[in-house]
Amino acid sequence: MSEETLSNLLHENRRFEPPADLAAAANVKADAYAAAEADPEGFWAQAAERLTWDQKWDRVLDWDNPPFAKWFVGGRINAAYNCVDRHVEAGRGDRVAIHWVGEPLEDARDLTYAELKDEVCKAANALTELGVRTGDRVAIYMPMIPEAVIAMLACARIGAPHTVVFGGFSAEALASRIEDCEAKVVVTSDGGYRRGAPSPLKPAVDEARAISAKSGHAVEKVLVVRRTGQDVDWDDAVDVWWHDTVDTASAEHTPEAFDAEHPLFVMYTSGTTGKPKGILHTTGGYLVGTSWTHYEVFDLKPETDVYWCSADIGWITGHSYIVYGPLANGATEVLYEGTPDFPERGRWWDIIEQHKVTIFYTAPTAIRSFMKQGREIPDSKDLSSLRLLGSVGEPINPEAYIWYREVIGGGRTPVVDTWWQTETGMILISPLPGVTAGKPGSAMKPLPGVGAEVVNDEGVPVPNGHGGYLVLTQPWPAMLRTIWGDDQRYVDTYWARFKDQGYYFAGDGAKKDEDGDLWLLGRVDDVMNVSGHRLSTTEIESALVSHPYVAESAVVGATDPDTGQAVVAYVILREEATKTLGEDGGEGIAKVLSDHVRKEIGPIAKPRQIMIVPELPKTRSGKIMRRLLRDVAEHREVGDVTTLADSTIMDLISAGQARSTDD
Ligand code: PRX
């Protein structure tokens, strides 16, 4: 974010007080901050009491061997029991858990808690029948259909950690995740609906299985939901239909209680190197953190609210705030399969009107795309049921915040801008809707019981009015426990930068305003944030370099009005390639390379622009100066080039022709 944007942000002085009725009835009031500060462990123990434990913990937190935390030590719990059975046992079996909305208009299905329980039990029995045992990993690669949630909960029920891979990732990306966590079984579907057409998934699983087999890892079974009815290749030794195995299984299943630190899932996310990191979350602390914050930040009243989080279950937001948090709280929620604008641009608002959604949680990139379409579409719908709006995934610019509040929220609803990460598992920085006056663009303060600071290079907190690195100063229940199979990488990535202080380094820049409130400024490392999705520059560079035409590449995230950041790639072609294609690679080169990135990683990683360049700007020690490449990508005057080994290079690059990668 430029200095100019930053100072504009800090001149933002609009304030929105919590509505009086919401404040009066809020789940969490202002006294929570002091209570948590006086006794953090007592505070989290109280949050844990909201769940049903088979055996209570002996100790809230074991931080004797930092940065390896144990929460609710000695406690035993089943996550799926907490998300379904206990609501049914308490007499709430008839409450709708999920209003599922398929993309085709005629597709819809409501699942009550009692029905969800039966489905989860059947799936747990079926997975056991397929050979899945406690501790085995199961990969889930699915569209947004109820079976995706059921599969996750079934895994949790039998203590088999799941790894959900976003359906937009390629076969290669799926294979690398399957291999890294050695998944025994994959759950998928024939396909899902995307903009009115069936879009296949099973072929990518077949391909991923073949790739993994070559590297010596055999997936034993693939469980396939029939969603679209499209043709699929079938391997009788491996593939089984969901309707043959799950639908016919018994709906009786006794959940086993697992240790609070039993692995619940692995979620892969981009870091600063090419290899995605498997973020490990465990059972007790994660469920406490997500259910508590869902209750606290969204002020959930499960008897009356209808909650909708528009994320995909393939990301952490879907795990924490579609599956585990809301269901542990007995919420009624919407699950939507498709794109926001199909069959027409008001689809999301129709869903809110139809289901009388009261709490809505989405990403700034979506809000900005609706802003572009104009307010006529939402204005023509009845959105008066909404009482609270949430934002996540990237900094929300004040214009988008105001539009969201005014146009979608009718000027009544608080907007909670929630900061967190795959690694944190739960929201850590956010206004409390009944307590905090909202400032457009600020995530405000750490939640009660959470320690966050902005520090300088030496790890010293900066004074109000200054910026620095965001760190977390104390452990929290839903924190990642490690990187799957790589404790050292866990220590190095998050805990080495401020080792002396014992701080977790989030990788984000932030500023404290004059009141000490926090404004998030985006990543300070080589991680990009495109439409709220994390991508690493090195991951895309490796994908580009794996193409036979490419000698070298450098990728930067450039500011983009729609997606927050966009991928811009600078590519040096191999000599052999230029001999046949010409110096600049010819007309079709950008499309060829961008298709290659799509194939290696997935459509979300597709560069907005590819620039064929003769050289890359490097320091004398050979480090690529991305700052200068960002200047070019963002059409700024190129900054200081004196540390470049060859200072004329930037003239050559700036003079080059950017190629759009549009199909
Ligand atoms: O840079 C921050 C940004 O998203 C990163 C985490 O990405 P991921 O692990 O994919 O999780 C996204 C959903 C929790 C953070 O390091 N980010 C997330 N929320 C915000 C944000 N940046 C600013 N404001 C936010 N509210």
Image (cartoon, helix red, strand yellow):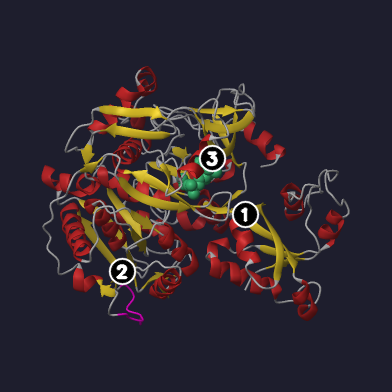
Q: Amino acid at mark 1?
A: Thr
107 falls in the magenta region: no
Query: What secondary structure is found at the residue carrying circle 1?
Result: helix
Look at 42% across and 68% down and name the residue there. Answer: 216
Q: Looking at the rendering, which quadrant does residue 117 occupy?
A: bottom left
Q: Residue 327, position in %: x, y?
A: 27, 47
Q: How many marks?
A: 3
Q: Which tag is nearer the camera, tag 1 or tag 2?
A: 2
Quarter holding the C terminus is bottom right
Quickly name the residue at label 3.
Answer: 492
Quickly name the residue at label 1.
Answer: 537
Q: Amino acid at mark 2?
A: Glu
Residue span colored magenta: 227-235
Residue 471: in sight, yes or no?
yes
Q: Looking at the rendering, which quadrant does residue 658 occupy?
A: bottom right
Query: What secondary structure is found at the residue carrying circle 2?
Result: loop
Name the N-terminal-most of marks 1 and 2.
2
Residue placed farthest to the top in the image? 38
* Whether label 2 touches label 3, CB < 8 Å: no
| Residue 10: assigned label | none
